[in-house]
Amino acid sequence: MGADDKIKAAAEKLAGKAKETAGKVVGDDKLVAEGKTEQAKGEVRDAAENVKDAFKK
């Protein structure tokens, strides 16, 4: 996995967690859902890169 891809995945997961937490604090269900979606995208990006790395070896 390239460093750029690791950073993007981590940033996406972190931003999603922040949105989810903020949504919970203010009671905004839409923001909570957006945060969870963003975290899931980060997880998918991370998993895809791990698969690529596995095939490179």
Image (cartoon, rainbow, N blue to C red):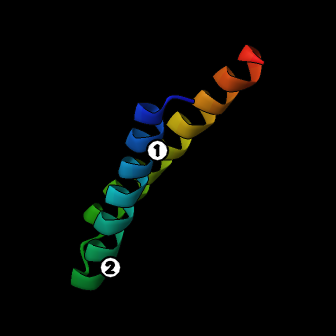
Q: Residue 21, can we see it?
A: yes
For disc 1, the marked residue is 42
Tell me if label 1 and label 2 are in contact, CB under 8 Å. Answer: no
Q: Is residue 15 left or right of residue 43?
A: left
- Which quadrant: the C terminus? top right
Q: Looking at the picture, does residue 43 appear above or below residue 28?
A: above
Of labels 1 and 2, the one closer to you: 1
Distance CA(mark 1)–CA(mark 2):
20 Å
Indicate the amino acid at tag 1.
Gly
Q: Is residue 24 left or right of residue 51?
A: left
The image shows residue 34 at horizontal and vertical percentages of 32, 55
Tell me which residue sits at (21%, 82%) in the image: 26
Q: Earlier in the sequence, mark 1 or mark 2?
A: 2
Q: Is residue 11 left or right of residue 45?
A: left
Q: Is residue 51 left or right of residue 27?
A: right
Tell me which residue sits at (44%, 53%) in the image: 39
Disc on res. 3: none
The image shows residue 53 at horizontal and vertical percentages of 68, 24
Indicate the amino acid at tag 2.
Lys
Q: Nearer the viewer, residue 41 or 27?
A: 41
Q: Looking at the picture, does residue 57 appear above or below residue 11?
A: above
Quarter occupied by residue 43: top right
Which residue is most to the top?
Answer: 56
The image shows residue 36 at horizontal and vertical percentages of 42, 57
Q: Residues within 10 Å of mark 1 (few under 14, many from 20)?
A: many
Tell me which residue sits at (45%, 33%) in the image: 5
- Which quadrant: the N terminus? top right
Q: Nearer the viewer, residue 54 or 17?
A: 54
Q: Residues within 10 Å of mark 2 (few under 14, many from 20)?
A: some
For disc 2, the marked residue is 24
